[in-house]
Amino acid sequence: MTRRPLAGLRVVELADQQAEWAGKLLADMGADVIKVEPPEGAATRTVGPFVDDVPDPERSLFFWHYNTSKRSVTLNLSTREGRALFLQLAAQADAVIETTMPGALDALGVGYDALATANPRLVMVSVTPWGPDGPYAAYASGDLIQMAMSGIINSCGYDDHDLPPVRPGENHAYHIASHHAVIGLMAALLGRELSGRGQRVDIAVHDCASVCSEFAATHWFYMGNLVLRQTGRHAHPLITAPSAHPARDARWANYGQTFNENAWQRFLAWAEVAGFEELFQQFGDASDRLARGSEVVDAMSAAMAALDAEQIWKLGQSLGLPWAMIRRPEEWLDDPHSEARGFFQKVNQEGYGQPLRFAGPPYTFTEHPGEIRRAPRTGEHNQQVYGELGYSAAELSSLRDTGVI
Amino acid sequence: MAALPLENVRVLDFSWAMAGPQASRLLADLGADVIRLESAARPDLARTSFGPHPHGQGVHGLDSSGYFNHFNRNKRSVTLNMQREEAQTVFRDLLSTADVVLENFSAGVLTRWGWPFSRMREVRPDIVYVSMAGPGHRGPYANQRTFGPTVQALSGLTYLSGFPGMQPAGWGFSYMDHTGGYTAAIAILFALYQRVQAGYGEHVDLSQIEAAITLTGTAILDYQVNGRASAPQGNRSRHPAAAPHGIYRCADEDGRDRWIAIACYTDEQWQTLIEAAGRPAWATDDSLAGLSGRLADEDAIDRALDAWTRPQLAQELMRRLQRMGVPAGVVQNHRDLTQEDEQLEHREMFPQIFHDLLGEYRTDGLPIRLSETPGGVRVRSPLWGEHTDVVLSQMLGYDSGKMKSLRGQEVLA
């Protein structure tokens, strides 16, 4: 069997939707990620969509997506025995990722100090909405709230500013925070090779999302200019030309003029063959085309009026132009590129009768690739994991009866 | 004195524009020695074009861009034209001291320069090589050219962002340059961990399009399981289900439209919200007390909330709602982030960076706080070729004759 890149790395995850993605990224690459759930199951098991739209903790596609390749144990942190189990899990782990509210684990006696006493090599990553302290530390959160407060939503929306700005679909503030959590965790593990000791990693969702804004930051920091949201393209202090255009099939293609002279000549050669030479005779060199930007793009649109969005995308690419189209995510499922790369991995997910294709890791380790394994059932690995800690079947049965696990 | 966690990691960084530099910025902030390899044969768009350039584009040659400074602090710059024959030995010598090679070119560029992974490995057997072309290095689209916005368009991220029935609004910036960078940094750290544990390096073929596809949530599973085509949700949320869940207009300020995000994930939050609104008649209907009733009446609730928020000042309203426990957040712009947001001030998220040619400006801090070995912003971005001499003379031991010869052949340009 191929050794996975993170083989031997053990992580205890006590995380909600803010950082489940972090644990998943580690687990898919071979880390042993033990997801700690309350006895009734993690709250994200109640988030849809569900198989056949029937709500059930073992049918949540949301949980499946964010929890592949992990093991699941249950324990009740409000019991003394549950806290002892958590401490034992952390004592044998390289890292803990947790998303409890600031101070909550300390109050239970299983905060960083207690865990680090048991395991000085432990790396503990705490992901909180706003940070462990400060004026907003107790503010209510949510992905929408974070995306608004970060400045991201201020850049997203339509030319018409009577329409609300738009939160990009899915929970991206949590994706951004999870990515930083993984980077912090791995850096601390590599640092442990130098120091021999673990440390705490403090990740605030608000911090992470607030430094994910590209030009909005540089225009403000360097010029004191705020950006204006614009339909389907970069926010900018000035209004810019559209970059997405409707194609014959009423789908959207991304193209624009080019100031690369070679590429422009290739486009003109195509236009000539396609019978649209006269549309472009009026345009001169790059500076003339720059000055008449919208006319150039209108002429291009006219020349491509008989093409579908996919044809435009591939025409541009055949000419060496970075054109695209707006696709739906599921269109990649049977795309030849995904198939050639083996991007989607078939997973036999319990609770569903046939293999499902999950998006694979986006970084192909060409000799030691990651592997997507199915998400666990609630407490599926209690016996296995607690057995590894030395608990007998009788002891586990008693812990189950008393509501500890 | 604690070392920075990546202090013993050296990265040879061919990357340009933004996605690669975002990756190496994170590594540099955490202590890695990131050496940018740059050439006048293809200068970084972030030096020549992406702005703003506070004193004018090109006023300081290739050192005029604030954008470049923002994404390349803590790094070193060596000029090396890989298309020159003599560059081969310089690169070989650099490689023999390196841990990581990073590039975000289209597929095949390093091979054309004579450095396929197999050859890198001959020089440095445990080298980690991370490429991050949009489509990746393998597959029928491997030669396609992408940049942030088109990665977002192709992946489905753009499609999922907007109001139903309208043109997709997409993302108003290159989210996938940031996130492609995060993903590359993760891949590098995974590969370095593997090297520590197992002793070998590897070529990691990262695809930014694939990275974007993984971030489309449950769309792909829902399509397979329930046959449901993915669709944009505007500002609403079904997973988790919440209502109200939207962005509402506040009083304009300085001629700009202002907005507040409000979400009620629980019935209790809804009760608190309508308390804050003074229990208006429209909100107290029993049918709205539960989530399903609010979901059914979302349009009417959104209209009424919008009318309620419309005359109010966004920051004041947020503070009042948050004091009561309602999830609310201003749609903040960068003035808000740097002048109104008390939490970001408390966290010192936007430190100053001094650049001797450009001046002193704020920049994005490092949002990863390590308790014992904190990284962060240390020095400005490198001037064009600023470290060519120190790296080649001191690190590689080239004598002045060799340096002169390399310069004469325009290898170091």
Image: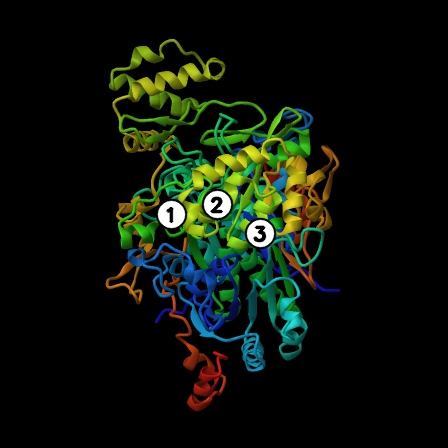
C-alpha distance separating marks 3 and 1: 40 Å
Q: Chain of mark 3?
A: A
Q: Chain of mark 2?
A: B
Pointer 2 residue: B285
Q: Quadrant of residue A282?
A: top left
x and y percentages locating residue B138 in the rendered image? 34, 48
For label 3, the SS is loop
Mark 1 Cα-neighbour bin, 10 Å: few <14, some 14–19, many ≥20: many
Mark 3 Cα-neighbour bin, 10 Å: few <14, some 14–19, many ≥20: many
**Residue at the spot 44% in from the left edge and 68% down from the top edge:** A41
B354 vs B52, left or right, is right
Pointer 3 residue: A141
The amino acid sitting under disc 3 is Ser
B310 vs A304, left or right, is right
x and y percentages locating residue A151 in the rendered image? 59, 40
**Residue at the spot 35% in from the left edge and 30% down from the top edge:** A253
Contact, mark 2 vs mark 3 (Cβ under 8 Å): no
Q: Chain of mark 1?
A: B
The amino acid sitting under disc 1 is His
For label 2, the SS is loop
Give the vertical position of B69 relative to A334 (above or below). Answer: above
Tag of residue B260: none
Number of residue marks: 3
The amino acid sitting under disc 2 is Asp
**Residue at the spot 45% in from the left edge and 51% down from the top edge:** B291
Task: Report the coloring of the rendering.
Answer: rainbow
